[in-house]
Image: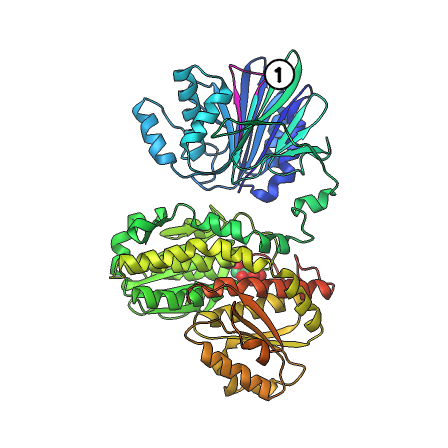
Amino acid sequence: MCGIVGYIGKREAWPILIKGLERLEYRGYDSAGIALMESGAFSVYKKKGRVAELSKFVKNNKLSGGVGIAHTRWATHGVPSDRNAHPHVSNSGDIVIVHNGIIENYLAIKKILINKGYKFKSDTDTEVLANLIEDIKKNTKVSVEEAVRLALAEVTGAYAILVLSKDEPGTMVVAKVGSPAVIGVGKNEFFIASDATPIVEHTKKVVYLEDGEMATIETKKDKLTLKIKTILSKKTKSPYIQTLKTKMEELEKGGFPHFMLKEIFEQPESLRNTIRGRIILEKGNVKFGGLEKFSKELQNLKHLVITGMGTARFTGLIGEYAFEELSGIPTKVEYGSEFTYRKSADAQHTGLIAISQSGETADTLNAIKKAKQDKMLTLGIVNVIGSSIARIVDAGIYNHVGPETAVASTKASTSQAVLLVMLAVYLGRMRGLSKKSGEEILKEIQKLPELVEEVLKNAKSIQKIAEKYKKSPNFFFLGRKYCAGAAMEGALKLKECSYIHAEGCNAAELKHGPISLIDKNFPTLVIAPADSMYEKNKTHIEEIKARGGKVIALVSSGNPEMKEIADDVIYIPKTLEMLTPILAFIPMQLLAYYISVERGNDVDKPRNLAKSVTVE
Ligand code: G6P
């Protein structure tokens, strides 16, 4: 995720652009840059670090221009650095571009351009696009608008881009597929941004560009005009100008009252971003760029240890089952804090998989350091690019879900779980998992974003359940097999946001002690999908009911009997047993969210917690 801002008009552009970037810093902040156009020449400045540093530079150097584009980056291709920061300039200096998204086929295009003599200064997909536009423009002698259109017809992936050309100083081209772009319409001036927050203080009139559309803002006889067309069919349409009524604070949260709810609802998209470009169906396999160099070491592994803290460790419990089922590699899950102080057995054949959203959790970081001392292969599943864990591990996989702002992890957790199953397929395919089985699992993974959308449609009914149970002083969350870890995560979500005491455990363990706590005031959420554990889970529910306990059953759609047995029923779509916990996460996140809001808590920043715990 990155933020882009553009301005074209009569005013000095940089103050508008810098302020816009500050508003978009929630979308990423590992580097920032700006390009300003003045009398047909560009001044481009970009730097690793926060927008504040860029702002200082621009002020001190008195940069000037009435047309400009700017970017705040959250690295996807290439580490955070000055040279990978945006804007990117094409070889001849004609094209300048900022980009939010991922161009999936950039390597193939880069090869063609290198053969034509193009040189690249960065590792980014964006610089490839800048040069592709230049190449088309030069060879076909078309306008920058048409060159952008033709280039975009060749790329796959997601993008929101802003493009300027030195040859056409009064023109700015905007295009979008998958990533957001909003155009603010002022009095003979236009503002473009990833969301409306940089725009509202200048104008309330906005045009939301749709996927597959591009806009061109041109100067004709000193007047600026806006035209919109579809990228592939060139069909023009008149801009639909809306008037914004929302307040600034609401806008930052994308219209949601809290970041947590926004991030819960982002999950269809964040899962798409996690999966994108990584599934090779025809091979029944997965492609993880970061692991390629280590395929021999990965083939030699005889044991796996998954480590992490909090949510990350609970998603690891899902991975534990998947690794054993698909790859046959004995796997255990260990707190980072404990792994650090344990003796490693057979370290040279053991791989450590460290999971961390922030990439900064001290306990997990220490576990990696210890594994490295013991000469284990260390892998990371990390969201924040360039974070300490991402840098220290031998190889890694990024979640690509964008910044997670609410303290309670939501979109990172579902991404971690899906990556673990994908990694299990990858390791399994090295060890005899058939192509057909790999293909079947990956096809189901591809359906996940849509299934999550279906679950989110039930938010209202979960809100009603939350209302009913908001005063409960205690809660149990139970599940078996793949869903045992999910139950623990459900309990964590509830306790961290609502301050209700909640325990998550394997449902079978209930009758070995915890069941003595059950009475009519002690509700239990049981994850009981239509899987190999359904009959057992049904028995657990009957056991609770027989002792007067209240049960919320989380079951697969089409379950005819649970509404007769449980007090409340939440339905999730059917999927593979190993993917079910990912769908089960969503209603539990919503339940925790709504109960916490009902109780008047600060859900985004619960008391006593920190988003990343960098002390042991
Ligand atoms: C903190 C947060 C948890 C999170 C854990 C691990 O305790 O409050 O929500 O799961 O850290 O964080 P990480 O960034 O390593 O995933």
Classify residue 259 as left or right of residue 452.
right
At horizontal 32% and vertical 58% (from top left) the residue drawn is 438
Which span of residues is magenta-colored?
Answer: 161-171
Quadrant of res 317: bottom left
On screen, 320 above or below 3?
A: below
Question: In the rendered image, is residue 530 in sight?
Answer: yes
Helix, strand or loop status at disc 1: strand
**Residue 291 locus on image (x, y percent):** 33, 50
Question: In the rendered image, is residue 365 in sight?
Answer: no
Classify residue 108 as left or right of residue 543.
left
Binning the other alpha carbons within 10 Å of mark 1 as few (below 14), some (14 to 19) or many (20 upward) gives some
Along the line of sight, the residue nearer the viewer: 431 or 234: 234
Q: Is residue 206 magenta?
A: no
At horizontal 40% and vertical 39% (from top left) the residue drawn is 104
Location of mark 1 (residue): 219
**Residue 399 locus on image (x, y percent):** 46, 51
Residue that lies at the very extreme toward the top in this rendered image: 221
At horizontal 73% and vertical 43% (from top left) the residue drawn is 246
Q: Is residue 163 magenta?
A: yes
* Residue type for callout 1: Thr
**Residue 19 locus on image (x, y percent):** 66, 33
**Ligand 1 occupies quarter:** bottom right
Q: Is mark 1 within 8 Å of ligand 1?
A: no
On screen, 511 above or below 76?
A: below
